[in-house]
Amino acid sequence: IGKDYFVDVRRIFSQFNAVGVGVTPQVTKKIKFRIFELAFCQISRKQGKITNYGLNMGRYEGEGEADWLPGCSMAYRHSSIGSTKFDLRRKGYALGEDVDFSLRMRQKGKLIWSSTPIVFHNTSPVNRLKREEMLRMTVRHRWTLLTDQISKMNKFSFFWSLFASIIYWFLRFLRYRKFENLLFLKAITLGFFDVLKKGPLNEVD
């Protein structure tokens, strides 16, 4: 962690009367205005927001309120947590666990993200999934978030994003002729069938 990390985090809790504080674990590039990817629901223009189709875009500059906080750098007031628990259905790789928990905590008060405290995040080589596996899992995890009704997600936006993603990866394959784009297209499609066949996550998965 960076110098004065805990001093900065305590200052943010106090200044904003926040129930949760998060910082960026690594440098994130600014998202330029790309109309194609915006239309295909691959990016969001808003920092720190959960979109209608379930995309969680982290903040990357400044300081202020957010819908969710990144799991590897989030902190919460112990007194505010109460009976709120992590979603144990999201076991294994626990995709979206930080998003789910953040949204539940946001119902209790402000979540503040800041670029002042610094965390150096080193990726572990252990228990890392291939990107196509992550994409497939993410589809069902987002569907679970929608069915839990703790976010502003809606079914139309979710399925538009899903079908648009299939088109998106197919067009990328046509443009760049890379086999990995076909793998990503297959992963999104399998994720769609997971939703149809299995529905939201449950305890026995």
Image: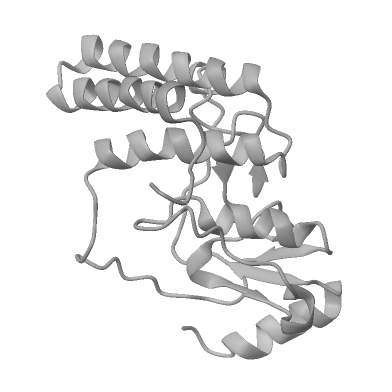
Question: Is residue 35 among the parts visible in the rendering?
Answer: no
Q: Is residue 94 above or below residue 171?
A: below
Q: Nearer the viewer, residue 168 or 84?
A: 84
For the image shown, how many numbered marks are present on the structure?
0
Q: Position of residue 75 (x, y in %)?
A: 63, 76
Q: Position of residue 111 (x, y in %)?
A: 74, 63
Q: Nearer the viewer, residue 183 or 16?
A: 183
Residue lying at 45% horizontally and 14% vertically, measured from the top left: 163
| Coloring applied to the structure | one colour
Relative horizontal placement of residue 71, taking residue 6 as reference (left or right): left
Report which quarter residue 127 is drawn in: bottom left
Question: Is residue 14 among the parts visible in the rendering?
Answer: yes
Report which quarter residue 60 is drawn in: bottom right
Relative horizontal placement of residue 121, taking residue 180 as reference (left or right): right
Report which quarter residue 179 is drawn in: top left
Residue lying at 66% horizontally and 41% vertically, measured from the top left: 148
Q: Is residue 172 above or below residue 1?
A: above
Q: Residue furthest front?
A: 204
Q: Nearer the viewer, residue 22 or 92?
A: 92
Residue lying at 37% horizontally and 39% vertically, measured from the top left: 137
Q: Position of residue 59 (x, y in %)?
A: 61, 53
Residue lying at 34% horizontally and 34% vertically, measured from the top left: 136
Q: Position of residue 202 (x, y in %)?
A: 49, 45
Q: Is residue 65 above or below residue 19?
A: above
